[in-house]
Image (cartoon, helix red, strand yellow):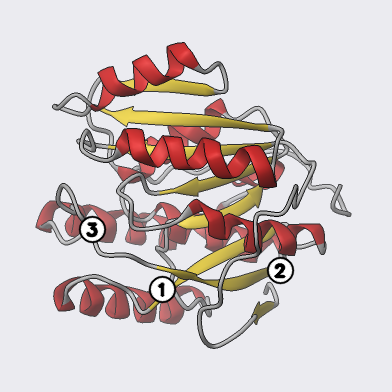
Amino acid sequence: MASRRSLISGASPALPLAGPVTLRGICVVLPAYNEEAVIAQTISRCVEVLSVIAPDYEIVVVDDGSRDQTGAIVDTLSAANPRIRVVHNTSNRGYGGALITGFDSATKALTFFMDSDGQFDIKELADLLAEREQGHRAVLGYRHKRQDGWVRKVNAWGWNLLVSILFGLRVRDVDCAFKLYDTELVQICDIHSEGAMVNTEMLVKLSRLGIPFVQVPVHHYPRQHGSATGANLGVILRAFRELLRLRRSIRRWQPRSPLEKEAS
């Protein structure tokens, strides 16, 4: 089983934006569903920060069948900046489906993903990149003082407990949408969960491969626009179906391609 380490018990300020934290190429995947009120601001912030801390970057925005102007807004931004690419899912595949679309589009050595709803600050990616420069190929953010309602918090607690019991994972925040992986690992894990199970599947497979990871606290901010879908009954039922499917299939799972013995 993969070894794990939690850096600190409380959140700390991200590293100052004094210069590049890494020279490795990084793909930032932003899944977006009906985020017209905030998507331009999120992308602008990404460009601002990435230009300093990780200058060899690309941003892949996955418009997951949005019914508002999200797709049109991102198309305009992409036309003005070649580092921004947009992939349109013709229908709403779900959170995992959007991430899979983004992962399949990544062309850089590192892959990072973050929600587009403004509840995270990409500046804190600097902390995760610093861990990658120390040789950690999987770096997981966890939400310090999560800014969600009690229903979502209770659901998250129960889900983390269930994942721990079924798969032996010891993760503080399985579904935190602030994670950094070597792109090679994402490709090897060959994710199939198109719903909320996507993070669990990734971490279970990393554990099966013996890949250690570290957990880094990140700030979490209240949602200012739109509405969350994680507590939707349909989303929850889909997650449980995918959970049972993974439970049945994980023993037979084989990685997509041979894993390099050492990190690049």
Give the position of the N terminus as an image quadrant.
bottom right
Query: Does residue 129 lie above or below 131 as drawn?
Result: above
Which label belongs to residue 163? 1
Callout 2: SS: loop
Residue 97 appears in the picture as rendered: no
Which label belongs to residue 212? 2
Callout 3: SS: loop
Q: Residue at x 32, y 44 (%)?
A: 95
Residue found farthest to the front: 18
Mark 1 in CB contact with mark 3 (< 8 angstroms): no
Instruction: Give the residue type that dot 3 points to.
Output: Arg
Q: Residue at x 64, y 37 (%)?
A: 51
Q: How many other residues sit within 10 Å of disc 3, few (<14), some (14-19) or many (≥20)?
A: some
Q: Which residue is mark 3?
A: 223
Instruction: Give the residue type that dot 2 points to.
Output: Pro
Earlier sequence position, callout 2 versus callout 3: 2
Task: Give the image location of residue 233, x and y in percent.
Answer: 11, 58
Instruction: Give the residue type that dot 1 points to.
Output: Val
Where on the picture, by quarter, is residue 154? Answer: bottom left
Task: Give the image location of residue 28, x and y in percent.
Answer: 54, 39
Earlier sequence position, callout 2 versus callout 1: 1
Would residue 47 appear left or right of 65 to someone viewing this image? right
Residue found farthest to the bottom: 9
Label 2 – label 1 distance at C-alpha: 17 Å
